[in-house]
Image (cartoon, rainbow, N blue to C red):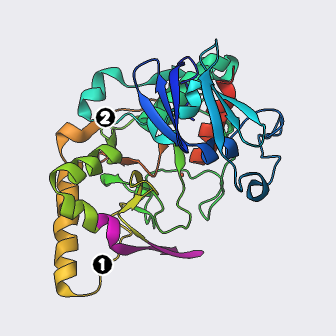
Amino acid sequence: MRLGAAERTVASAVLDGDVVRVELDDGTTVDRHALALRDGCVCADCRHPVSGQRLFESGRVLRDLQAIAVGVSPDGALVIEWSDGHRGSFGAGWFADGQPGLIRRWAASLRGSVPEHTWPDVTGNRPARAAWLRDAAELGFAVLHGVPTEPGLVAEVAGLFGAVRETNYGRVFDVSVTVGATNLADTALPLSPHTDNPYRDPTPTLQLLHCLVSGLDGGETVLVDGFDIVERMRRDVPDAFATLAREPICFAYRDEGAELCAESPIVTLGPQGDVAALHLNNRSKGIPTGEPARVAAWYDAYLALLELVESPGQQLVFRLEPGDVVLFDNLRILHGRTGFAGAGNRDALLSTLAVLERR
């Protein structure tokens, strides 16, 4: 169910064989199979009141079942009756699309309306915390100001919506310019927009960057909406898009204490063909293998993708000041930085947001 859709109502409903055709108050028409509605019934007899888990066996209830009547309740919900005598009620929010409905794609034009929030608000105010998480869910990132500049406090920020996943880098990864650094993040070099840790399975989803010190010139944060980039490719160069979604590439990283590798395509699609994730990291990517013609097609598609990523019209560039935290979806948002003059889970955020917005 799409969050925030509870205010809508069902205007009319028609039963056509096994299909229930629902028209919402905004004119949207949605078809649902009667078995899916019975299987998804959320009444007290069908779902646990706390966990929401199903209380009946689908294999027993759905066999030979038919819908026999539909209607609309006074409060604008679908009412449906089945041949087993069960009666269910479904609010309009049940018929909205799922999680993808949260996504709002963006480009550099977002610069004048970057989603910004404050630490005192999100820690002390439930609606403010929900607004912060909603921006992160919709746009893929959100900026938080006024977070105390204490080392390790970023883990407390993450704790507002989920658990911290510890890696070989530790619970918190401190980035600072050092001599003899083994990770390019610890150098003064610019970092092209990328996703982090594509050599892990699963790849980390939500990440937070907490600025503790910012006394040097340069080092601006660069964000790119990867979903907007690849959807542009799907529209303009569909063959290149299909290649990046089909051909896997190996990503790898190693240091004194770790040796990691994982294989995935640059673009990962969901079951309905929607873009679910990107894996793009020039520093850790391997090289494509196979027939030369397939390799050539992969490089054509990959270079076309990079051209879009590097376009100023796609990049949001801003400076993090001490006390700023940027929360972003690592499977959607490409992040980088300009050169100096001298690493949560996506489902945890969506779960916390849903709980905060319960009515």
Give the alpha-carbon distance from disc 2 to disc 1, as whole Å.
30 Å
Magenta region, residue range: 244-263
Residue at the image point whose x is 18% and y is 40% from the top: 312
In which quadrant of the rendered image does the N terminus lie? top right
Locate residue 95 relative to residue 315 in the image: left or right: right
Q: Toward the viewer: 73 or 329?
A: 73
Q: Is residue 209 visible?
A: no
Q: Does the magenta stretch mainly form a helix, a strand or a loop?
A: strand
Residue under pointer 1: 287
Type of amino acid under label 1 = Ile
In which quadrant of the rendered image does the C terminus lie? top right
Vertically, is 1 above or below 253? above
Residue under pointer 2: 106
Residue 306 is a magenta residue: no
Query: In the rendered image, which quarter is residue 104 located in?
Result: top left
Vertically, is 68 above or below 63? above
- The disc, 2 or 1, on the residue closer to the chain's N-terminal end is 2
Percent of width and height locating residue 357: 64, 24
Residue lying furthest top: 74
Type of amino acid under label 2 = Trp
Percent of width and height locating residue 348: 64, 43
